[in-house]
Image (cartoon, rainbow, N blue to C red):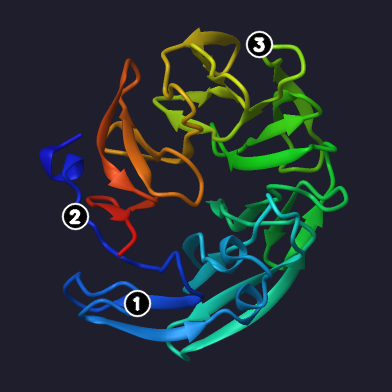
Amino acid sequence: MSRSGARAKKIIGATASATALVMALSAVGGQAGAAPRGFVRVASHAAAAAQPTSTGRAIADLQVWDGKVYMGYGDYGANTGPITVSSFEPRRGVVSDEFVQDTEAVYNYRAIGNRLIAPSIDPRVAADYAAGGPWAEASVAGASHVFDVATLTGTDLWMVGSKDMDAVAWRSLDGGTTWAEVLRVAPRTTGDHARFYFAGVLNGRLYVHATDAGTGAHPASNVFDGASWSEGPALISGYTRGWRPVEFNGELVYTANPQNTGRVHAFDGSASRIIGMGRDIEVTPRKLYLLDSW
């Protein structure tokens, strides 16, 4: 990673303590509870505002796709939901409700090919993810949780999370029509539960790293090279879960945990290091943007 990438400027794109969507116009700054200097409050998310908890009312993720800004929210700890998939159209300045997803939270959107995929972090019945457009839900694996989706080759699809007490990864080779369980990692302690919170792709390899609720991250990651699995370097440690890795300048960059401000990691294929603090990241071909609270 270049020095400019490692020292990415903090850019505020959404507030974590209110339902308003904020668009950056110039400088970063301002006081808590109000839009920073140079920002304009442009819209509110009515469905998020109606959530019964402060966590549920927070806009936790923004994703630009098809000229719109999609917003994620919810509280899967409090078992809320369903979640309204909504988008903000900058040209018209309106929020449109597009779909109701049968999950307790959406904290993650992934643009893969010509689809936007929203994993069902905690399915209320059985749907593992929703994809648009047009939007539809898929019940394909009976997962307990789906936290991330990815593609390794551009023609396959991966889905990671958990089933029962184990961390599990699934793969589809036919565009999502059929899925197979390809990796299952049990918790290290009887009675605990393990989860894969992310799937990251770097240099033709797919990385996952299990975390147990009681004892934290496993000592090694699991790596798929296109043919087989092997143990890999640690991407996380302690009670860090890892969240929404993106590739930038030859490295995986990811935050510590969903929804919370924490350490931002960069992984070069051999070792992980801390490059800053933040709650979300996005990339363009030449810039890395870090979202933090104000």
Picture quadrant where residue 97 is located: bottom right
Question: Spatial distance from mark 3 to mark 2, Cα to Cα?
Answer: 39 Å
Q: Which residue appears farthest toward the left when viewing the image?
A: 3
Q: Residue at x 59, y 63 (%)?
A: 73
Can you say which quadrant of the picture contains the C terminus?
bottom left
* Residues packed near mark 2 inside 10 Å, few (<14), some (14 to 19) or many (20 plus): some
x, y percent for residue 98: 69, 75
Q: Which residue appears farthest toward the bottom when viewing the image?
A: 92
Q: Residue at x 80, y 59 (%)?
A: 102
Left or right: 99 with respect to 147? right
Q: Is residue 253 above or below residue 290?
A: above
Q: Which mark is residue 9?
A: 2
Can you say which quadrant of the picture contains the N terminus?
top left
Q: Which mark is residue 23?
A: 1
Left or right: 4 with respect to 63? left
From where the camera sits, is residue 163 visible? yes
Look at the numbered disc 1 and give the secondary structure of its residue. strand
Q: Amino acid at mark 1?
A: Met
Picture quadrant where residue 256 is located: top left
Q: Residue at x 49, y 11 (%)?
A: 219
Q: Which mark is residue 188?
A: 3
